[in-house]
Image: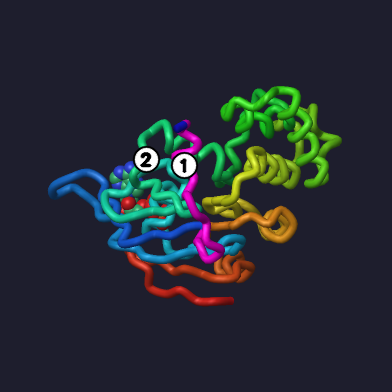
Amino acid sequence: MSSTASLQAPERPLEEHAIKVVDLKKRYGSGEDSTLALRGLTFSIDRGEFIAIIGPSGCGKTTLLNILGALDRPTSGKVYLDGVDVSRLGNKELAEVRSRKLGFVFQDFNLLSRMSVVENVELPMFIAGSDPELSRRRALSLLGRLGIAHKAGKNVNHISGGERQRVAVARALANDPTIVLADEPTGNLDTRNTEMMMGLMKQLHDEFRKTLVIITHNPEVAAHAQRVISIRDGSIVDIRRN
Ligand SMILES: Nc1ncnc2c1ncn2[C@@H]1O[C@H](COP(=O)(O)OP(=O)(O)O)[C@@H](O)[C@H]1O
Ligand SMILES: [Mg+2]
């Protein structure tokens, strides 16, 4: 059996969740100096849902997103992505899940500054071992759908802030993930750029049909989501529908 086959759930009932988390705990360090950053979270996110996770600084949002994004492992509890129990996967399989199922939009976008717009979008496809010619075509097509194909050859340092947002979103979509995770994507943006970013997030959800999880401490950003999960001190204190 190939490693890819082992990642597929044998049956995929319609009610299967995009993300399901059961009694998730994360402790950093050990002994007296340790921090229990997540204290037993249980929730699920439907396929195609748009969720905001909100809470004050230090409450565990990034810790949670890193675990949902297969970038880190829980201390205990279960995490299912598309029905696959990722808490049981080895490093190689985890990297494969990350590459195939997940797209990321980071705060400040983390674009590679020595590279062009199109090269930044190709990067996740390159990492996944995709054919270079197909990757170039797909990257250009994504840039087209996001309205910046005309900047494809520009260095990412020589485009505007709004254009950089578009590149970050195109890159998140590169491997056609089912789930996109965004950690404070508007964290360092002014009002106008926050609105532009939320327009892109809506497009990602409505037109590209992705399951979208945005972490934010901004209630105006959270107001765009279908449901809002509120976290305080590593615990869920509220889940409500907008
Ligand atoms: N790598 C780490 N090592 C030790 N403690 C950490 C680490 N990352 C985060 N923490 C701690 O875990 C808690 C949650 O942090 P974090 O998930 O970054 O919160 P948020 O993203 O909501 O600001 C905080 O108390 C933080 O200091
Ligand atoms: Mg954070």
Q: Position of residue 48 (x, y in %)?
A: 61, 61
Query: SS for tag 2?
Result: loop
Q: What amino acid is at disc 1?
A: Leu
Q: Residues within 10 Å of mark 1 (few under 14, many from 20)?
A: some
Q: Name the residue at 66% across, 38% down.
A: 174
* Residue plotted at (51% across, 70% down): 228
Residue stretch rendered in magenta on the structure? 2-17
- The image position of residue 168, as x and y in percent, is 66, 42
User: Is the residue marked by circle 2 packed among few (<14), some (14-19), or many (20+) residues within 10 Å?
Assistant: some
Dot 1 falls on a residue whose secondary structure is helix
Q: Which residue is mark 1?
A: 7
Going from N to C along the chain, the mark reached first, 2 or 1, is 1
Q: Which mark is residue 89?
A: 2
Q: Who's the residue at 17% across and 45% down the image?
A: 30
**Quadrant (top left/top right/bottom left/bottom right) for the N terminus:** top left
Mark 2: is the Cβ under 8 angstroms from ligand 1? no
Residue 61 in picture, x, y percent from top left = 42, 56
